[in-house]
Image (cartoon, rainbow, N blue to C red):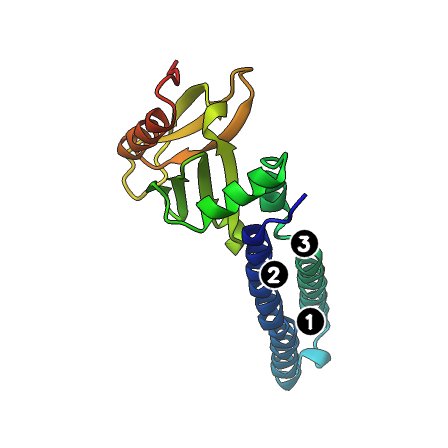
Amino acid sequence: MKQSVWLQNYEQEVYAKRNASNQKKKIIPIIFILMMAFGLIAAISNGALNDPQARTGLLAFVGIFAFLMIYVLILMKIGKKKDVAKYTRNEVMALFHSDYDVEQFDQEMNAAPLKELTINEGTTMFMTENYIGIKSMPCGDLRYSFIRKHDIASFHRKKTASTTGNPMKAAFFFDIRNHEQKVIMNGLADSGKQLEAIIDMLQTANPHITLP
């Protein structure tokens, strides 16, 4: 089966951004070492080595910094190994059953969406001729999820506490299910107005959608 050009371009983009981010993070251990060195110099200058109680505090200081350094190094190592394109890759590949599917997807993703709306801060939902997609930035990494319009059967929502600066404005968790009542997409709408916009988009995508 053909490879999706859109997916290849997406992977190149997110890997480039992740590599650039990892390069910037290399300075973090250096900052930790400098902070610890300045702390030790200041403590020794104040006679910490001559005071048993101060020496105990100094050892605790060194231990805390060492723990934090190890923790940061572990996180950086995990970040380097993380496959930031895996989620989107799996979402896209699940749509493909033939070369025609790949060509159709690439054509639609490289064109302007038929409809697009912001559903919460940093997250947009969009519609093409055959797909509904969600674009988000979890942990700073660009991520997409996709479903086919003809798989949409029902829309479910649940009110939750405000996710904005206005405590009086309720937010809504939602999920989209297929004809077997399996959740095929979910998300969060920051307000009732955004929830209604999502419903309007889905009803355009599939006029027969049920709204329990």
In the rendering, at what x and y percent does residue 154 appear? 44, 18
Image position of 98 (left or right of 187): right
Residue 93 image offset from top left, x and y in percent: 62, 40
Q: Which of the two labelled residues, at mark 1 and mark 3, occupies the earlier sequence position?
A: 1
- At mark 3, the secondary structure is loop
Give the Cα separation between the discs numbered 1 and 3. Answer: 36 Å
Asked if residue 114 shows in the view, the reply is: yes
Residue at 40%, 23% (x, y): give it: 157
Which residue carries the number 2 mark? 15
Foreground tag (1 vs 2) = 2
How far apart in space, not on screen, are marks 1 and 2 (Cα)? 42 Å
At horizontal 58% and vertical 45% (from top left) the residue drawn is 88
Residue highlighted by disc 1: 58
Circle 2: element type = helix
Q: Secondary structure at mark 1?
A: helix
Q: Amino acid at mark 3?
A: Lys
Task: Pinpoint residue 19: horizontal percent, then vertical percent.
Answer: 62, 66
Q: Quadrant of residue 128?
A: top left
Query: Circle 3: is it few (<14), some (14-19), or many (20+) Cα within 10 Å?
Result: few
Residue 202's image quarter?
top left
Binning the other alpha carbons within 10 Å of mark 1 as few (below 14), some (14 to 19) or many (20 upward) gives: some
* Residue found at x 54% / y 44%: 103
Side (left or right) of 192 relative to 8: left
Which amino acid is tagged 2? Tyr
Could you say which is closer to the camera, residue 168 or residue 106? 106
CA separation, marks 3 and 2?
10 Å
Of residues 41 and 108, the one nearer the viewer is 108
| Image quadrant assignment for residue 25 | bottom right
Q: Looking at the picture, does residue 149 appear above or below residue 4?
A: above
The amino acid type found where label 1 is placed reads Leu
Residue visible at 40% across and 36% down in the picture = 129
Q: Name the residue beneath numbered marker 3.
A: 82
